[in-house]
Image (cartoon, rainbow, N blue to C red):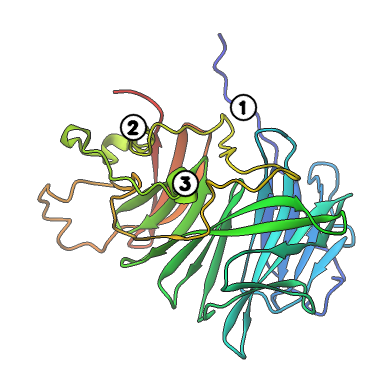
Amino acid sequence: MSTSPPEFEARQLSLPKPLHTASPHVAALLYDPISRSVALRHSDSSFSLYPSFSPLSTSSFPPPQSLVPSPTSSAAFLHLRTAANSTTTTLFLVSSPILRPSSTFLRFYILRDDRFARIRVVSSHRDLEFDRTKFGVVFRVNHGVSMKLTGGINVFTLYSVSNSKIWVFAVRLIGDEGGGEALKLMKCAVIDCCLPVFTIRVLFGFLILGEENGVRVFPLHPLIKGNHRKEKKNNGKRHNLKNGFTNAIDVAKASSGGKTVGTDGDLNMLPAKGEKHSDSVKLRSLKLRQDSKDVGAFFVAFEDKNVESSISTTRRSVKAISIQALSANYFVVLDTLLEMYTFYPFLVLSKD
C-alpha cells in the first residue's frame, strides 16, 4: 500500500479593497474548514463574514454577505450536529462588553442560504437573558479585560481572564413559538482557574487547556452530563509526553465511564430540533477547579519534573500556546521557550 504524503496547494489572496466597513485594516482572519467560511476581523473589532469561500477558485474577496458590528472582544465558529441528523449547522459566535451594568453580551449568527443571520436564543438560567432590542444574550458576568471564545461540536467555552473562570456551554437547535428556529443555550460547567491558561481548544470530545509545561485534558461528556465521577487510579500509571507519545485519551475515556465520541469527534448527546428536552442535560452547572482530578481530568506534562537537570532550574517555563488536531488520533501542541517554538505530537487512542 502506498504511503505517499498528501498533496497541498497554497495560493496568495488579496484582501478586499476598498473594504465594506468603516475600518480599512484587517487585524485577523478566522477560517472554518467545515463550512468553508471566513471571518475577517477589522481594526475596529467588526467582522466581515464570507460563507462558502473557496480560496482555490478566487484570488480576491468578494463583498461580504454579512457584517458583525463592533465592538467585539472574541469570536469563534461553532457547529451543531445530532445523532439523528448528520447535517452540520454552522454558527458564528461573538462576545462584547456591556458597561452598565457590567456584563458580557453574546451574539449568535446562523448560516442559512449562504448567509449568516442572527438567531433568537432561549435559556433557563437566571444569569442568561435574551435581549430582544439588541438581539443577543446578556450573560450577567463582568466582562473584564479579556474574554476568549472557542467552539466545537454542540459545545463552546468562554474564558474570562479577569474572573479566572471557564464556562462550558451546550447549544442545540429548537423550534420557536412562531414555527421558526431558535437556539437553546445551556450552561453546563464552570471551571475555576488557579493556574495560567494560554490557550483553550474543544477538540474531538475533549476540552484541552494549554498551560505551563503541558496541557490539561477534560473529557467533555461528564462536563455536559454532570456526571461528577472520581478519576480512576489506573494502577498508578503516569502520563506525560516522554518521546512525544502517550495514551492519554484512553485514560480519559476509562475515567468518564467508557463514553466514546464519534469518528469525527461528535458528542451526539443533545436532542435534535423538535425533540423533547433531555432530562439528562442539567440546568445546574457543574463546578470544579482547574487542577481537579474529578470527571476524569488529568494533566499531560511535556517533561518529568522529577528528573533533575541543571538546565531546567535556570530556564524559563515552557508554555503551551497552541493546540491543533491532525485527526481524531493525533494532536500537535506548540510551546514557547525563550522565544523558540517546539512541536509536541502525542498519540492517542492507542494501547501500549
- Checking the image for residue 134, the label placed there is none
Residue 187 versus residue 325 in the image, above or below: below
Q: Earlier in the sequence, mark 1 or mark 2?
A: 1
Report if the CB atoms under discs 3 and 1 are less than 8 Å apart: no
Q: Which residue is mark 2?
A: 247
Percent across and percent down for residue 269 are 57, 40
- The outermost residue toward the bottom is 100
| Residue at the image position 30 percent from the left and 47 percent from the top | 298
Element on which disc 3 rests? helix
Viewer-side label of 1, 2 = 2
Percent across and percent down for residue 28 are 66, 65
Q: Which residue is mark 1?
A: 6
Residue 158 versus residue 69 in the image, above or below: above
Q: Earlier in the sequence, mark 3 or mark 1?
A: 1
What amino acid is labelled 2 in the image? Asn
In screen coordinates, is 223 left or right of 307?
right
